[in-house]
Amino acid sequence: MATWRNGYAEDCKSFHPSSILGVASIKNIAGSMINKEIFKIASNTENFGSLDNYTHSSNLKNSMCGDNIKVYLVVKKGKIMKFKYEGNACIYCQASASLLSKSTKYKSVKNVKNFIKNAKTFFDNENVLCSNNWKIFKKIMSKKNVARKNCLLLPLKTLLKALNN
């Protein structure tokens, strides 16, 4: 098990969604640098795992910290019908992947690609306009989490790569 300092695993990738409650408690998280919202989102593991009969997939690794994420998609008639993800990544990357997997289902590929293209601006300007479909991402992609920008954007980059293949 990883050693935790200020809410982060020392190796930056010891978080696994099914074991998060055994690794850190809400009380510890509340006093640490990890936002409670990140913890809550990452704890939602309904789309964690692999997917059989996927039409698109991609795997990316963050060369800075070693986070690795793989996405599996079923795309039909230009819409994402199923989305699963798995990987060895920090809590920020897991939260982003969880939220992304939930938010992109039944959305058009074009709409998702437009969102991904604009998502990096959320860190610079909290007043960026976006459709209601994507406003939830402003909770995690903000100036307060700019130090974890690469972690939070890795699932989006992986999804974009899968959609472009």
Image (cartoon, rainbow, N blue to C red):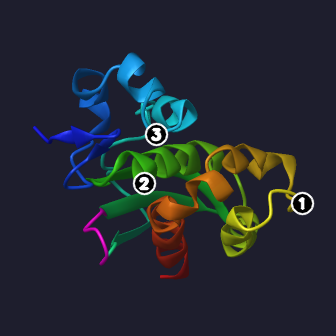
Residue of label 2:
93
Asked if residue 63 is positioned above or below residue 129 in the image, the reply reads: below
Q: Is residue 100 left or right of residue 90?
A: right
Cα distance in 3D space between marks 3 and 2 = 12 Å
Instruction: Single out the mark in the foreground, 3 or 2.
Output: 3
Q: Tag on residue 129?
A: 1
Q: Tag on residue 34?
A: 3
Tell me the crowding category of disc 3: few under 14, some 14 to 19, or many 20 or more residues within 10 angstroms, Cα based: some
Relative to the observer, which residue lies in front, 74 or 145?
145
Q: Residue at x 21, y 51 (%)?
A: 10
Place of residue 120 in the rendered image (x, y in percent of width and height, measured from the top left) = 66, 70
Q: Tag on residue 20?
A: none
Quarter placement of the N terminus: top left
Q: Residue at x 50, y 62 (%)?
A: 147
Which quarter of the figure has residue 91? top left
Relative to the observer, which residue lies in front, 103 or 105?
103
Is any part of residue 142 visible from this angle?
no
Secondary structure at numbered mark 3: loop
Please tell me which of labels 3 and 2 falls first in the chain: 3
Please tell me which of labels 2 and 1 falls first in the chain: 2
Cα distance in 3D space between marks 2 and 1 = 23 Å
Which quarter of the figure has residue 76? bottom right
Place of residue 32 in the rendered image (x, y in percent of width and height, measured from the top left) = 42, 34
Q: Report the magenta residues as a range.
A: 63-67
Secondary structure, magenta segment, majority class: loop
* Three-letter amino acid code at the position of disc 2: Cys
Place of residue 3 in the rendered image (x, y in percent of width and height, measured from the top left) = 15, 41
